[in-house]
Image: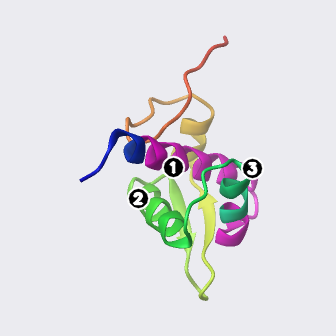
Amino acid sequence: MKTHLQDAHRRNMRWYILSIADAGRTLGVSETTTLRALTDAKLSPTPSEVRDEATYLERKGLLEIDKDDQLWNFTITAPGIDIVNYDEKCPKAIGRPQKHWD
C-alpha cells in the first residue's frame, strides 16, 4: 500500500530528474550523475527508483532515455523544458514547486 509520503517522494524525484536533465540540456546526463544529485538533495533513491521514475517521464514525453549500454543517459525534451520553465501546466504526478514570482 502506498503512503502519502511515498507518493510525495516519487513526485519530488520526478521533478528533480527533470531539473537535472534540464541542467544538462545540450548533452544529457547519465543516470550516475542523476543518482548522485538526487542523493545530494537528500532523496536517497535506489538506482531502480531512478530508472522507474525516468521511464515514467519518458512515457509522458518529457524525457528521452538512451539505453545503449548498461548505463542510461537522460535528455530533456521540449515539453519537459516547458514544464521546468513553468511555461506549461505540470502534471500532478510531478512535484514541481509552486511559482512564487512573476
- Residue occupied by mark 2: 56
Q: Amino acid at mark 3?
A: Ala
Q: Evaluate if marks 1 and 2 touch, with contact meaning CB atoms under 8 Å apart.
A: yes
Q: Which mark is residue 23?
A: 3
Marks 3, 1: nearer the viewer: 1
Regarding residue 39, the answer to whether it shows in the image is: yes
Per the rendered image, the range of residues in magenta is: 8-34
Q: Residue at x 46, y 55 (%)?
A: 57
Residue 50 point in image, percent of width and height: 53, 64
Q: Residue at x 75, y 58 (%)?
A: 26
Q: Residue at x 44, y 29 (%)?
A: 89
- Does dot 1 land on a helix, a strand or a loop? helix
Q: Estimate the spatial distance between the alpha carbons at disc 3 and disc 2, rounded to whole Å.
A: 19 Å
- The quarter of the rendered structure image containing the C terminus is top right
| Comes first in the chain, label 1 or label 2 | 1
Q: Evaluate if marks 3 and 2 touch, with contact meaning CB atoms under 8 Å apart.
A: no
> What is the crowding at mark 2: few (fewer than 14 residues within 10 Å), some, or many (at least 20)?
some
Q: Is residue 52 above or below residue 78?
A: below
Regarding residue 28, the answer to whether it shows in the image is: no
Q: Which mark is residue 14?
A: 1
Q: Which picture quadrant has residue 45?
A: bottom right
Q: Amino acid at mark 1?
A: Arg
- Does dot 2 land on a helix, a strand or a loop? helix
Residue 94 is left or right of residue 84, and the answer is left
